[in-house]
Image (cartoon, rainbow, N blue to C red):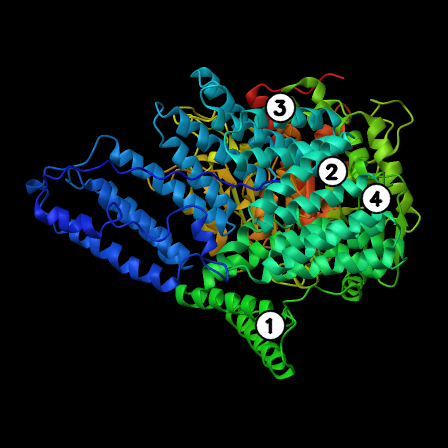
Amino acid sequence: MLVVLLATSLLVVPPFSVDAADDLDACLRQAPVQSPPPINWGEGVPQMWSSTPPVPRDTVRAYLSQVRAARACFRTLDPSRVERPYLGNIMRTFQVETALLAALRRFADAFETFEDARSYLNAAPNIPSAEGTRTGWIRALHQDQGFLHFRIGNLSASITHYSTALRKTSEHEVGLRVTHLLDVGLLHQYTQDYQSARRYYTRARRLAREHDRTSEEHPSEWARLLYLQANLLLEETLNTEFDRASLRRARDLARKGRSLATSSDRRIDLALALSESLGYLGSFDRAYALNAEVRRYAQARDDAQLRAFALLKLGVLHMQTERWTEAKSVLNTSLAIAERMGNLDQQRRIRRGLGRLHELQQNWATAEDQYRAGVAVIKRYRESLTATQWASTAFAQWRDVHRGLVRTLLAQNQPRAALAALDRTRARYLRDLRTRNRVATQLSPATRARFDSLGRALTDVRNRLGTDSLSDATEAALRARKASLMANRQRVLRLDSARTPRPSVDEIAASIAQQDRTLVSYFLDDPWPVYDRPPRSAAFVLTGDTLQAVALPGLSQDSIRAHVNTISSLFADRQASRSISAMHFDLRPLRALHDHLYAPVAAHLPDGQPLTVIPDGPMFHVPFSMLATAAPGGRYDHEQARFVLHERPTALDLSASLATDTSATRGDAASSSSDLAAFGVSSFDPLRPPPPSLPSSRADTTAASSLSLPPLPGVRSEINALDRLFDDAKTFLDEQATEPAFAAASQEADVLHLASHALVSPSSSLRNAFLLHPDSSSDGLLFLHELQTRDRALPLAVLSGCNTARGTLRGGEGMAGLQYAFRIMGAQSTVSNLWPTADRSSVALMESFYKNLRAGQPKDQALRQAKLTYMENHPDNLSPFFWASAVLYGSPRPLQMNASDGSSLRTWGPVALALLVVLLGWSLVRFRSQLGLTASQQ
């Protein structure tokens, strides 16, 4: 696990000679170059946020006034009378001021100062400066701002600034470029975008080798690189798919890095990584010896945090070797240290370890108690977050505590409590983002500052309540204060009690009954093989009056993932969509997935009743309606195959509680008619450069590269079909489909249809983008965060581009792609694609889908019927590749949509209709003869 997080280097100000004017010397005496600040960028800033800051806060405030006075002094100088360069000193005052403001938790002021510093530098002041000062300070400011975003939890913004720092680093500063590549890779690792992290680490290694930066000449640089690569392999293997080859590679990297490390701290980091990898590979004696070395080092340095972490890893080793008593003892010691330090993340990890310990011994009630204590720790941590942090809270790293609680409740035959616990692990990030959006768009800066202040006060009260030496009167006063602070926070956010809590299982069941549906929420266990624990997977089948936990014996996320990857090369390799073979979907894994996932619950489902499915893990990659119920003709005989599609309509959602959102949507059939706005782009010339706001989407992108995007000829047919179907549709094609047109139309429309290419950012859903047409006022890149100004719900968003349902798979959240981003922005339902679609099949499916919506069908039924119609009309394209890609998330309820004038034919009398048919037939024959058209010969 990571101990050292990010390396932050400060720009060094060159020394000055003594021949300057007295005025400059007077300014320098106040400036950081001669009067060192009490806090600089680095670990000192977050240390100031603790209950025992290393420097008195009054000292920081006093120096803040001094550094501002120094800058004011510099700016009064006449540059024409000063020979010595001093621009770097002015920029240094900005840098120090941002660090001081951050140390005082005045984050908004710090970010404003960053912007002031860049604005000042971009104004190109005519001030003497050393060579490289301007470009160097641009880089340093982005690096420091990225570090602050990282420390307060906003990982996507941190990636943006570190990536900018990388781009602003001169090609000649190879060591600094290597450092920034590692920084950006580490940030991607924190977002669990392991693929991008690996690419950045590989680029750093390649860059070092290309410039002959050998491990002998640069041992510290290589030690950090090898440590990060080893740590990535450990984390990825244990969080995704257990792989002993990766563990052996991590062991070798850690061993080599340890031989290169020049600092004791780095050597200890690598010792822990090596110990962990050796333990998982069964080399317990050496793993124990290395762990003991780390504990001796922590004891000698009086480093309580490192000692607690090493004891946690020692407890894991004891569990692997079944030394249950020793494991319990060291984990409890580690927990006591973490509680004394107030380290909530360590407490969460240790509670998880204690829960697993008792789970392995089948002490279910004790394991439940430990997991519940871990859940309480997570709740305390989340409630201490400031409003700006919510958007990047990595709940995926915490959900294993909740999932442990689900397992123990299932083992004790408590399905209702287990489903409630499972639902609390899902769509947490989405709900946080929705709340963050409300905070960002509705609260004034002063109100947001008050909200953050209340959060800090609440944390302090909770910490005091955690002590044992309180009198009854003091404890009562603190609890009253806690209740008052929580109530004030709720009032600030304008979240009444009816909106805040998740619905109960009974409330979810009532909503499902009202919709005449059944809900199935899957729990796919993912046990670590090192613990030799069998998986405890289950499917919760919820109807209006029943709840059953159906056991799925032997099923794990790894086993499902193995079946998914063999459906087609499309699922194993994201670049395989260009291959013809990718279209051939193997029915064997689709049948196996049916047998493992659908068949066990089918007996509990009423025939034909619509189904809402809450997938888990790798299930998100596969449309549920595509599972094969029968494949009598062989692995590629799609003509005789039958699918869940043939049995019932299906809709997907991210959590069971989100399914209750469908009970009262703005655009249901009982409401007024829904307006449709459709945007399509069919041609993408000239080629655009990669958007600078998506630096994380492609690790190998350079400033001079460009995106080559193929044309989409079917988009024109798709948009024209919508124009024909709905007389009040607002359609925008190619040059008309601009960002200003979208901004205006999207505020009024109830249904948004977008047909174009899409760009997906692995680090942040809100940085995903649709490509519209550029115009004089916009670049044509519609970022999803630009939809935050929409002040009302969106009943339906249809995202007709390729891969619009795909994205980085995040635990409890599904895939963080474009459909996920639209759900964040308030879309009650989305239709999106899981893989690159065939152009003609997409047009046919969309036209049929909208016809069915116009006829009043629920969305899931409309999509199902569109797919069945496609299969009936295209017998040569029966592979699921052509028809299964589109999936519905969210509300299945129907929409009332106005048809075009042609639909009024149904109201004509029989005679008038017959006359019209005759007239049309005569006209067609006449026009055919005039154009030289002939009928087909039979």
Q: Mark 2 highlights which residue?
A: 618
- Amino acid type of disc 1? Asp
Q: Tell me which numbered mark, 4 or 3, is placed earlier along the sequence.
A: 4
Residue 575, numbered circle: 3
Disc 2 secondary structure class:
helix
Mark 2 or 3: in front is: 2
Residue 496, numbered circle: 1
Q: Position of residue 33 (x, y in %)?
A: 25, 45
| Cα separation between marks 1 and 2 | 36 Å
Residue 323, numbered circle: 4
Disc 3 secondary structure class:
helix
Q: Tell me which numbered mark, 2 or 3, is placed earlier along the sequence.
A: 3
- Amino acid type of disc 2? Pro
Disc 1 secondary structure class:
loop
Q: Going 64% across and 52% down the picture, which residue do you hit?
A: 346
| Cα separation between marks 4 and 3 | 47 Å
Query: Dot 3, crowdedness within 10 Å: few (<14), some or many (≥20)?
Result: few
